[in-house]
Amino acid sequence: MPDHLHMLLAFPHDREMKKTVTDWKSMLARKAGLGWQRDFFDHRTRNHENWEEKAEYIRQNPVRAGLIDRPENWRFVWEPSLGGPARSALPV
């Protein structure tokens, strides 16, 4: 999406999510010249079905916004199951 980001991430139990996301946002802001909003919204998934439901919501987001006609046409996505590098225009 042009104005926000969705991700599905898994964190080790010994890592604090807020610090990890904050550090990642800082690094990406420096490298790509991005400005971020101050905080983030997290939602913990509880099971495989919930994970798939959230993944499909993310895939459909640019379709709902009228930016593309099919999720596979969105070039700013990377899914490990698809293999290959992330399809992104960000200079990282």
Image: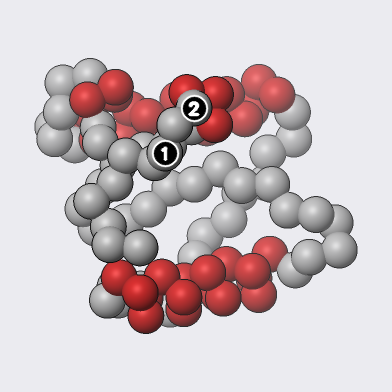
Identity of the residue furthest to the right in this view: 14
In the depicted view, which residue is nearer to us: 18 or 83?
83
Residue at the image position 66 percent from the left and 21 percent from the top: 49
Position of residue 7 measured from the top left corner of the image (x, y, whole percent): 49, 47
Q: Is residue 33 left or right of residue 22?
A: left
Pointer 1: what residue? 85
Give the camera-side residue of 20 and 53. Answer: 20
Amino acid type at mark 1: Pro
Vertical arrangement, residue 52 with respect to residue 29, above or below: above
Specify the quadrant of the image occupied by residue 91: bottom left
Residue 30 visible in rendering: yes
Q: Residue at x 49, y 27 (%)?
A: 83
Q: Is residue 55 visible?
A: no
* Quadrant of the rendering where the C terminus is positioned: bottom left
Provide the residue designation for mark 2: 83
Q: Decide: marks 2, 1 in contact (CB < 8 A)?
A: no
In front: 55, or 33? 33
Q: Nearer the viewer, residue 14 or 86?
A: 86
Q: Secondary structure at mark 1?
A: loop
The percent coordinates of residue 44 (x first, y second) are 67, 46
| Residue drawn at 43 percent across, 47 percent down | 6
Q: Residue 51 vs residue 32: left or right?
A: right
- Mark 1 Cα within 10 Å, few/some/many (few <14, many 20+)? few
Q: Is residue 15 left or right of residue 26?
A: right
Amino acid type at image mark 2:
Gly
The dot on residue 16 is: none
13 to 10, vertically: above or below = below
Residue at 37 percent across and 80 percent down: it is 30
Task: Give the structural element (helix, strand or loop) at label 2.
Answer: loop
- Characterize the local packing of mark 2: few (<14), some (14-19) or many (20 or more) Cα atoms within 10 angstroms: few
